Image (spheres, rainbow, N blue to C red):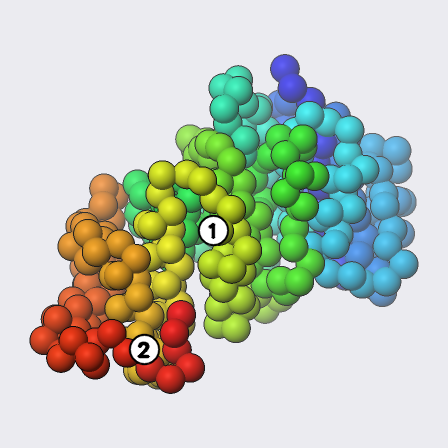
Amino acid sequence: MMEVSVVIPAYNRRTLIAEAIESVLAQTLPAREIIVVDDGSTDGTADIVAASFGTAVRLERLERNLGISAARNHGWRVATGELVALLDSDDAWLPGKLAAQVRQFEDANVLATHGRVELVDGTGQPMPRATAVYERAFRAAAARGYSYAGITRLWTRILPSTTVFRRRLLEPIGGFDARLRDFEDWDLFWRVATLGRVTVTPGTMARYRRHSGNTGMNLGAFELLNRKHLAEVLPGYRGPEAAVVRANLLRNLAWIAAERGDEAAQRARIRASIRARPALALQIWSPVRGASPVDLLPEVGATAAWWVRDQRAPRTHRDRPAAGNSS
C-alpha cells in the first residue's frame, strides 16, 4: 500500500495541535511520517509538539510567519511519502480515514481525493444543524463532479483536512500559490482538476472546528482566484470543457459584483458568461442530484432576469460592455 506523509501547518495552536496529531497516530493505517510545520509561532506551539510527541513527529520550524501556503509548501517539499495528506492544526481525523483514502489511489488516474466533515464548535462539541447544512451543499457539489468545469461552479466544498494528493504532481503545478491569502486551497484543487481525476472518498473523514480563528468569506480574495484562472490557468487548458469553465468563472465574478451591489458589473459579467457558453443559460440551472431546487432559486432568478433583459435590449446596447467591466 502507498505510504503517506501527513503535513500539519501550525501557527499559535498550542492548545489544539495535540488533538490533531493524536488523531493521526490513532489511524488504522500508520502514516509514513507526520510533519508539523511551525509557521513562526510565538505561543510555544513547537515546544509543545517536541515535548509531547518527540520522534513520533518531524518538526520543521520556520523562522518567521510566512502564511499557510508557504507552510504547506515547505511540508510537502520535505515529505518522502508517495501521497501527501493535509491536516489543519485545529481539526482532527476520524478513525479509518487514512486507510479509506489511500484505497482511492489504487486507480492510477486519481490525482487527489477528499471527503465529508463533521462540524464542531470551538470546544469540540458537535454542531448537527451546521453539519446538515454543509452536507446538503456537499451533495450538490459532489453531484456536479470535480472536473475543471464541475469544480469551478462557485462553491467547491473541499476542506484541506480531508485532502490527499499524489506528491509527484505538486511540484509541476507549483503547490499552493502564496500570492493568495485566502482560497489558496480551492486554487490548488482547481488546478489539479485540469490534470486528472479528483474523487470523493465515501464516509466522514474529519471533524472540522468552527471558531473565531476561521477564515470568513473574503470577496477580494475570491475575485483574485477567479481572475487568476481566467488569465493564467484557463488559457493553457486543453480539455473539452474550456467554454463551460470560462462561463463558470464569469458567473462567479457576477456573483461577487452582486454581493457588492455593483449592478452594472453583475449585468456585464452575466452577459459575458452566456456568450461564453449560450447553452448554459438553460442547462446550468437544472436541479442537480442531492440539491433542493429551492437552493438554486436565487441564482436562477438572477440569471433569468438579466438574460431576458439582455435579449430585449437593442443590439448596439447589448454588445457594448459597461465601462470598466469588460470581464
Earlier-in-chain disc, 2 versus 1: 1
Give the residue furthest to the top.
1
Q: Residue at x 19, y 52 (%)?
A: 279
116, above or below 275, in the image: above
Looking at the rendered structure, the secondary structure element under dot 1 is: helix
Q: In terms of depth relative to the viewer, which is nearer, 246 or 185?
A: 246
Residue 40 shown left or right of residue 316 in the figure: right
Q: Is residue 163 above or below residue 109?
A: below
Kind of element beneath mark 2: loop
Instruction: Give the numbered dot on residue 321.
Output: 2
Which numbered dot is residue 72? none
Tag nearer the camera, 2 or 1: 2
Picture coordinates of residue 184, whole percent (x, y): 59, 56
Outermost residue to the front: 316
Determine which residue is flagged by label 1: 234
Q: Quadrant of residue 92?
A: top right
Q: Is residue 256 left or right of residue 158?
A: left
The outermost residue toward the left is: 312
Residue 34 visible to an observer of this rendering:
yes
Inspect the image, locate mark 2, and give the three-letter code of the amino acid beneath it.
Pro
Figure quadrant of the N terminus? top right
Write the residue at 52% across / 51% down. Answer: 233
Circle 1 residues within 10 Å: few <14, some 14–19, many ≥20: many
Do we see residue 159 in this rendering?
no
